[in-house]
């Protein structure tokens, strides 16, 4: 019967201390994990919005549908100056100038 008394297992106190330590660590990292998940979800929504805006911008560019007419003057010093007529396309955060095709 003596061989069952010294089995080398953990005592109840050691198990309780380990559970308390693990619970404390989990409670300390829970807010960090929660905020990380929220930021990941926010970034995902932003990416979806940007892809939708980009697709809409590309459709406007392909069909050359302009929201307003614009004249752009490009110059460098006194030697070079050029006027370019075109249209402005605005979609969300994106703005693009598309020159008219020269005929």
Image (cartoon, rainbow, N blue to C red):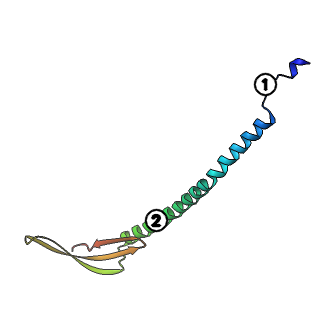
Query: Residue 22, percent across and down?
Result: 69, 44
Relative horizontal placement of residue 23, taking residue 60 as reference (left or right):
right
Query: Residue 89, percent across and down?
Result: 36, 75
Residues 14 and 57: in front is: 14
Mark 2 is surrounded, within 10 Å at the Cα level, by few (under 14), some (14 to 19) or many (20 or more) other residues, namely some
Q: CA distance from mark 1 to mark 2?
A: 61 Å
Q: Is residue 49 above or below residue 33?
A: below
Determine the residue located farthest toward the front in the rendered image.
Answer: 13
Specify the quadrant of the image occupied by residue 38.
bottom right
Relative horizontal placement of residue 47, taking residue 96 as reference (left or right):
right
Residues 35 and 42: in front is: 35
Relative horizontal placement of residue 26, taking residue 49 as reference (left or right):
right
Asked if the residues shown at circle 1 and circle 2 are in contact, with their CB atoms under 8 angstroms apart, the answer is no
Q: Earlier in the sequence, mark 1 or mark 2?
A: 1
Residues 64 and 74: in front is: 74
Mark 1 is surrounded, within 10 Å at the Cα level, by few (under 14), some (14 to 19) or many (20 or more) other residues, namely few
Determine the residue located farthest toward the right in the rendered image.
Answer: 1
Asked which secondary structure carries label 2, the reply is helix
Which quadrant of the figure contains the C terminus?
Answer: bottom left
Specify the quadrant of the image occupied by residue 55.
bottom left
Asked which secondary structure carries label 1, the reply is loop
Question: In this figure, which residue is indicated by the disc labeled 2?
Answer: 50
Q: Is residue 100 above or below residue 8?
A: below
Question: In this figure, which residue is indicated by the disc labeled 1?
Answer: 8
Query: Residue 98, percent across and down?
Result: 30, 72
Residues 84 and 90: in front is: 90
Residue at figure coordinates x 62%, y 51% from the top left: 29
Residue at figure coordinates x 36%, y 70% from the top left: 61
Residue depth check, mark 1 versus mark 2: number of the one nearer the observer: 1
Residue at figure coordinates x 54%, y 63% from the top left: 42
Query: Residue 69, percent across and down?
Result: 30, 81
């Amino acid at each position: 019967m003596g061989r069952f008394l010294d089995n080398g297992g953990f005592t109840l106190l050691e198990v309780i201390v380990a559970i308390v330590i693990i619970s404390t660590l989990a409670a300390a990292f829970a807010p960090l994990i929660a905020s990380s998940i929220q930021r990941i979800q926010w970034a995902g929504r932003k990416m979806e919005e940007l892809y939708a805006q980009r697709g809409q911008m590309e459709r406007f560019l392909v069909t050359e549908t302009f929201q307003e007419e614009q004249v752009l003057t490009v110059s460098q010093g006194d030697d070079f100056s050029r006027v370019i007529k075109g249209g402005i396309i605005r979609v969300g955060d994106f703005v693009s100038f598309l020159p008219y095709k020269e005929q």
